[in-house]
Amino acid sequence: MKRYTTYDSDTSTALVTGQAHPHVDGVTRPSGMPDNLALLEEVTEARPTYDSATHKLVEDAVTYDTPNAQAIRSWSAVALTQAEIDERTPEHYETSTGIKMATDLQSQAAFSNMMILLNEAGMADTEMVMIKDCFGASHGMTLAEFRTQAVAYGLHCYTQFHS
């Protein structure tokens, strides 16, 4: 169901939002409605795609397009400040290749299980494996590279546990 905003062009303000069209046919301007008032169909634009690790979605001010009889709601992707990025980043260990690996107990257990699985599978050091960083993004590397990263990660977690 379409929704409408009653807009006052004299004061450039929205008087009422989210209302059904006041006329039964949904098109005709109600009789006696002052000329400075306009019925604007509420239009919501698609939200932009963005990387939630570096940006946030911010609702823009509503655009009142009186010539086209629309009240347009839109969003912008805005870069996060370093403080916001730090606040949203889980506790982690950063590998020598820049991968941020989560250090919560569940992540440590999953990592240990992966090590056991890879060792039992008898994979060659040149085979590719995938790990997820603390944001859930996948990173590929050889098993040899993974083992090097795994030892450093394990030592970091061990040190944190005993500090």
Image (cartoon, rainbow, N blue to C red):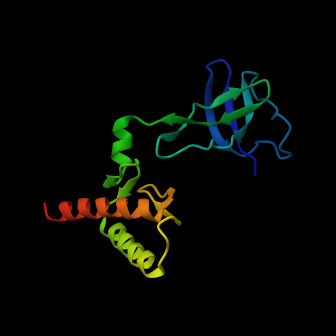
Residue 132 place in picture, x, y as percent: 46, 60
In the image, is residue 10 above or below residue 7?
above
52 to 69, vertically: above or below: below
Q: Residue furthest bottom?
A: 120
Q: Quadrant of residue 111?
A: bottom left
Q: Which of these two is toward me, 31 or 109?
A: 109
Find residue 41 and report its horizontal and vertical position in percent.
74, 38
Residue 18's x, y, as percent?
65, 44
Q: Which residue is located at x 35 percent, y 63 percent?
A: 150
**Residue found at x 72% / y 26%:** 65
Residue under the point 49% across and 41% down: 56
Q: Residue furthest top?
A: 10
For this rendering, which residue is in front, 149 or 108?
149
Whether 158 is drawn above or below 12: the answer is: below
Q: Quadrant of residue 106?
A: bottom left
Nearest to the observer: residue 48 or residue 24: 48
Left-right relation of 46 to 105:
right
Looking at the picture, tell me which residue is in the foreground, 73 or 125.
Answer: 125
Number of labels in the image equals 0
Which residue is rendered at x = 42% and y = 59% of the image? 145
With 157 as the anchor, is 71 left or right in this view? right
Q: Which of the 4 quarters of the picture holds residue 120?
A: bottom left
Position of 120 with respect to 103 (left or right) is right
Q: Position of residue 6 (x, y in %)?
A: 68, 33
